[in-house]
Image (cartoon, rainbow, N blue to C red):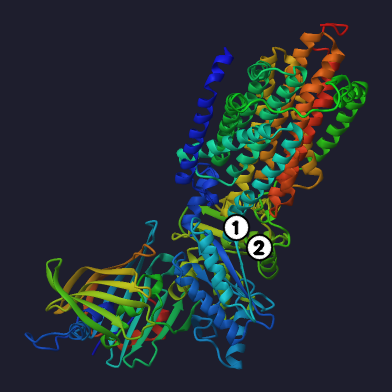
């Protein structure tokens, strides 16, 4: 039956080429990168709906920070002119609204003496002489709305903030900003930082680094495949399975107009790790068959390969696909897509392995077997010896595994979550150095917005409300990671001080609500009311308190949120509810969601895999035994992360999906062979040895290829990709070792497939 | 004499002008703008000013102000008392505006809760007035000679025959790159004006929603300014207008600011 089908081999190859060509066209025509991180967020999640709304109420936007440093101090005509010119240039940029640029040049300065009130800018024309410069310095030092916020307290750095819309940032815009900044270098140093830069660079750098690394990974895999398969043809078609399944997957994605997200760039990585297995197992089987049956025909070789291997290959593919499909439970769309398209990729790899590989063998002939000295004698092979050693030391294996698990569980207890984008960059990278520099001189580059919502109009004018807000600010500012904060209270305090001839003791909230209202009216009339609408809404019902944090990781944010939530009851008594908003908060919620989803899907796929294995092998015990390698791999992965202080993040959590996808394949191949040999020989020791000789070898090859390939990523310039390489390599290693040691040992001890006494 | 000052009253001064030239003569853009600028205005006026501020999300705030204005020739004095909202009631604001273009306005503010009068020195005519969408200049402080005017065309607007005039500032650094004004022939009222920002982009539109003839003076009684870039709107309405009533000089004093409206 199968022999007749082989006549269509040419046709199969042509169809494969045609589909590949179509996929290429589709990718070329429709592929689109998504770099806007907001698009990753589940927009219908309550936290996101609220935050997005609040961002509109208060015009909350992430800012690009341009810092101008002059070690001699910024109060000299040259530096002041640079601040002015940069401000004006930024205001003129098409991507930036004029009123969204803030600097010493744009800031309002309201000052007063006993009888008068002076509303003006700090400077318009550049102060020329010493007295004017000295006067400006004095005014800046006296204005707590500016000092330490726009000008550093040591007076060597001034910042210009350009707030931009979420979707404004792209590489061209970044280049434009950098180019602009560079024009003003010397003797002043100009730094560019801020969340949009970090996010934008990240979204751009990660795929870029992948693009550079993947060819090297493939090259290494080719070399190792050549070594283990010993045939150029076999290597070529094993590789083609991986590459074509990737191309088809991206082709389908493009055809369905699904954009490429940062996590999607992991699909080739996944398919490389998973897809090579099919080819390796098929060819390894074929090679062994040819060794045992020298002189067999193409048709015979292909037929034996397919009859013996279609089942485990299909089973491994199905379980892997299930693992990926379980990611659909994630609330995060890119992860859903990642799961679905990875599953599709695995499906393609399966089709190609069972379709294209036989067709290719038929058309291009059997691989040439390297002639080794001496006849084919498995009894003397390395695999037999290893089998005997493992059987001999099976109790040691069990104890060692238990110890390993214990250590892993300790490690797991120390796993922490990070939503930090900055941590993804090299410690001494420009972007982190700049961030540290600005954090040193100013409040911090990460913003947390606390939204206070009162029930009635003018709530925010009440003295007790403003005092509680300031109390909350002071309390949070005690945290080392909270640099400073800003609220309506700061405006009122400033007005009170100004109206009392700048006397320090009046830098407080007055007790009279009408006075507060009159101050605010005065500010609206004399200052720039736009500034007011960033901290309070039009009806004084809602307020926005901004906290500047010196770190964007979850720990810092969560600590601050905890302190702020400590004021929940106090605010409740005032009829006010606390909410959070802003990009930092959204990233935090997002990370939690992402991890929650991934851990859920991890557990779900573990369960499904057990069920599937039970069905496939018609034995619950096999289902449980088969899940041993993946359970261990998952535990070890998280354990190592905990022990090595690698935070759980979107990338690292995805790696656990690979653990399941691959670990289960090893187990299936091994168990399937074991079952077949058990029936054939009825001898437990021989079955074990033959299984190791056949399946163990293929698994070893498979692990070797993928580990070698992924070790390459350790040389990536992009830290998350390095972590990925190291973790996947380790994953494969643990899965491999887990399969041939502990799983095998338990399989052996359980006497599955053998009646008591070791006979079938 | 012109009325130049900082509130709606000044709009009247700006938009209603004395007919300087006799009919039939060919008018230039500058002539038209002068007719608008120099136009009979009352010696003094008392009115309630309702200021409605609407932000981009449609939230609305209403301020009620009682105002008195008197023209002294070389100086125009004005005093304003807030009536509502309640928490700012009797906050008062006084402005003396001088004919001499080199002389800045004198301004005072009184906060009743603080019981203190402060003199305000503000240096910038392009500042927004009271957090509204009007700048001090929009309210009538700008002399026709500060701009170049060109009649673009004549057309009907709201059934009135209008000159459409484009004005470009002589000072290239001015906050507007140009304005376009629709002036009603004969009445010399500006019915509509479009403002373009420094980059030449459409910024604001001023529309006159209502005007009345009060004791022979053409007065704009409801005007709307819409900032299209910020999507913010200010509506100013004058009610209970009384003109030429002989407001005493003691009305424009610090003592009066403190006493408030009874």
Q: Secondary structure at mark 1?
A: helix
Question: Is any part of residue B147 visible from this angle?
Answer: yes
Q: Is residue A256 left or right of residue A403?
A: left
Q: Quadrant of residue B186?
A: bottom left
Q: Is residue A142 left or right of residue B189?
A: right
Whether pointer 2 and pointer 1 mark residues with C-beta atoms closer than 8 Å, the reply is yes
Residue highlighted by disc 1: A201
Q: CA distance from mark 2 to mark 1?
A: 9 Å
Residue highlighted by disc 2: A431
Q: Quadrant of the C terminus of chain B?
A: bottom left
> Along the line of sight, which residue is nearer the eye, A510 or A263?
A263
Q: Chain of mark 1?
A: A
Instruction: Judge the density around disc 1: few (<14), some (14-19), many (≥20) Cα neighbours within 10 Å.
Output: some
Q: Position of residue A155 (x, y in %)?
A: 66, 79
Considering only vertical position in the picture, is A513 above or below B3?
above
Q: Quadrant of the N terminus of chain B?
A: bottom left
Q: Position of residue A382 (x, y in %)?
A: 87, 27
* Dot placed on the residue nearer the N-terminal end, 2 or 1: 1
Considering only vertical position in the picture, is B127 above or below A484?
below
Q: Position of residue A477 (x, y in %)?
A: 68, 62
Question: Is any part of residue B7 visible from this angle?
Answer: no
Q: Quadrant of residue A189?
A: bottom right
Q: Position of residue A716 (x, y in %)?
A: 70, 52
> Along the line of sight, which residue is nearer the eye, A560 or A508?
A560
Q: Chain of mark 2?
A: A
Instruction: Judge the density around disc 2: few (<14), some (14-19), many (≥20) Cα neighbours within 10 Å.
Output: many
Q: Secondary structure at mark 2?
A: helix
Considering only vertical position in the picture, is A309 above or below A267?
above
């Amino acid at each position: 039956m199968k022999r007749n089908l082989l006549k269509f081999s040419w046709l199969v190859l042509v169809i494969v080429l045609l589909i590949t060509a179509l996929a290429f066209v589709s990718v070329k025509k429709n592929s689109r990168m998504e770099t806007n991180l907001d698009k990753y967020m589940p927009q219908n999640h309550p936290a996101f709906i609220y935050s997005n709304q609040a961002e509109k109420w208060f015009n909350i936007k992430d800012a690009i920070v341009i810092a101008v440093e002059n070690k001699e101090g910024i109060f000299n005509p040259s530096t002041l002119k640079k601040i002015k010119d940069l401000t004006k240039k930024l205001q003129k940029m098409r991507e930036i609204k004029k009123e969204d640029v803030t600097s010493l040049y744009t800031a309002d300065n309201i000052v007063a003496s006993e009888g008068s009130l002076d509303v003006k800018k700090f400077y318009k024309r550049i102060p020329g002489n010493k007295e004017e410069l000295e006067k400006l310095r004095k005014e800046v030092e006296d204005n707590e709305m500016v000092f330490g916020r726009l000008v550093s307290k040591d007076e060597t750095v001034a910042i210009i903030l350009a707030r931009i819309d979420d979707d404004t940032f792209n590489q061209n815009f970044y280049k434009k900003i950098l180019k602009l900044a560079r024009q003003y270098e010397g003797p002043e140093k100009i730094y560019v930082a801020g969340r949009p830069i970090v996010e934008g660079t990240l979204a751009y750098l990660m795929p870029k680094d992948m693009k550079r690394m993947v060819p090297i990974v493939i090259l290494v895999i080719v070399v190792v495949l050549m070594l283990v398969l010993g045939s150029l043809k076999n290597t070529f078609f094993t590789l083609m399975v991986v590459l074509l399944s990737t191309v088809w997957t991206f082709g389908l994605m493009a055809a369905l107009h699904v954009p490429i997200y940062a996590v999607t760039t992991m699909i080739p990585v996944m398919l490389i790790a998973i897809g090579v297995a099919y080819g390796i197992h098929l060819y390894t089987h074929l090679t062994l068959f040819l060794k045992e049956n020298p002189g067999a025909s193409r048709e015979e070789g292909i037929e034996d390969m397919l009859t013996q291997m279609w089942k485990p290959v299909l089973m491994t593919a199905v379980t892997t696909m299930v693992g990926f499909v379980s990611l659909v439970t994630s609330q995060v769309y890119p992860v859903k897509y990642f799961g679905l398209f990875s599953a599709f990729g695995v499906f393609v790899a399966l089709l190609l392995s069972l379709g294209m590989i036989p067709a290719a063998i038929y058309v291009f002939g059997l691989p040439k077997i390297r002639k080794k000295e001496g006849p084919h004698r498995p009894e003397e092979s390395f695999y037999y010896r290893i089998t005997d050693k493992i059987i001999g030391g099976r109790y040691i294996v069990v104890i060692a595994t238990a110890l390993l698990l214990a250590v892993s569980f300790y490690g797991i207890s120390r796993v922490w979550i990070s939503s930090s984008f900055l941590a993804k960059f090299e410690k001494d990278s420009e972007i982190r150095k700049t961030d540290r520099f600005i954090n040193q001189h100013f409040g911090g580059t990460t913003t947390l917005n606390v939204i206070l919502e009162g029930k009635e109009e003018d709530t925010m004018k009440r003295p007790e409300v403003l005092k509680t807000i300031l109390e909350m600010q002071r309390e949070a500012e005690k945290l080392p990671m909270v640099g400073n904060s800003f609220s309506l209270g700061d405006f009122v305090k400033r007005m009170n001080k100004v109206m009392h001839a700048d006397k320090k003791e009046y830098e407080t909230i007055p007790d009279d609500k009408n006075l507060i209202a009159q101050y605010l009216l005065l500010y609206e009339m004399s200052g720039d009311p736009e500034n007011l609408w960033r901290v309070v809404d039009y009806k004084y019902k809602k307020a926005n308190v901004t906290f500047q944090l010196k770190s964007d990781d979850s720990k810092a944010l969560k600590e601050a949120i905890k302190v702020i939530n400590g004021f929940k009851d106090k605010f409740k008594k005032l009829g006010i509810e606390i909410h959070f908003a802003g990009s930092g908060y959204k990233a935090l919620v997002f990370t939690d969601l992402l991890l929650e989803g991934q851990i859920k899907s991890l557990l779900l796929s573990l369960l499904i895999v057990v069920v599937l294995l039970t069905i496939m092998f018609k034995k619950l015990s096999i289902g449980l035994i088969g899940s041993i390698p993946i359970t261990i791999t998952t535990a070890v992965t998280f354990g190592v992360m905990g022990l090595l202080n690698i935070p759980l993040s979107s990338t690292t959590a995805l790696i656990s999906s690979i653990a399941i996808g691959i670990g289960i394949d090893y187990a299936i191949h091994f168990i399937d062979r074991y079952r077949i040999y058990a029936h054939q020989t009825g001898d437990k020791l021989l079955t074990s040895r033959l299984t190791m000789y056949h399946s163990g070898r293929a698994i070893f090859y498979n692990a070797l290829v993928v580990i070698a390939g992924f070790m390459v990523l350790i040389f990536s310039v992009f830290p998350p990709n390095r972590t990925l390489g190291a973790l996947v390599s380790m994953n494969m290693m643990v899965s491999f070792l887990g399969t041939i040691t502990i799983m095998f040992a338990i399989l052996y001890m359980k006497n599955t497939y053998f009646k008591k006494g070791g006979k079938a | 004499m012109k009325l130049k000052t900082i509130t709606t009253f000044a709009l009247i001064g700006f938009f209603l002008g004395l007919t300087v030239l006799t009919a039939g003569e060919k008018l230039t853009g500058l002539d038209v703008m002068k007719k608008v600028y120099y136009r009979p205005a009352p010696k003094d006026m008392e009115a309630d000013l309702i200021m409605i501020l609407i932000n981009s999300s449609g939230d609305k705030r209403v301020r009620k102000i009682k105002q008195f204005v008197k023209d002294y020739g070389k100086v125009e004095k004005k005093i304003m008392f807030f009536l509502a909202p309640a928490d700012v009631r009797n906050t008062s604001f006084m402005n003396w505006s001088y004919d001499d273009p080199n002389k800045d306005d004198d301004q005072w503010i009184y906060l009743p809760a603080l019981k203190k009068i402060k003199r305000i020195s503000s240096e910038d005519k392009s500042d927004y007035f009271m957090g509204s969408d009007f700048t001090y200049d929009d309210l009538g402080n700008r002399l026709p000679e500060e701009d170049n005017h060109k009649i673009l065309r004549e057309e009907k607007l709201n059934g009135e025959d209008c000159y459409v005039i484009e004005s470009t500032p002589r000072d290239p650094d001015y906050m507007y790159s140009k304005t376009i004004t629709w002036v009603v022939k004969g009445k010399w009222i500006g019915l509509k004006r479009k403002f373009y920002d420094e980059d030449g982009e459409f910024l604001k539109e001023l529309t006159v929603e209502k005007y009345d003839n009060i004791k022979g003076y053409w007065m704009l009684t409801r005007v709307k300014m819409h900032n299209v870039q910020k999507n913010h709107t200010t509506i100013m309405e004058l009610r209970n207008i009384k003109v030429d009533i002989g407001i005493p000089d003691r009305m424009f004093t610090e003592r009066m600011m403190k006493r408030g409206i009874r």
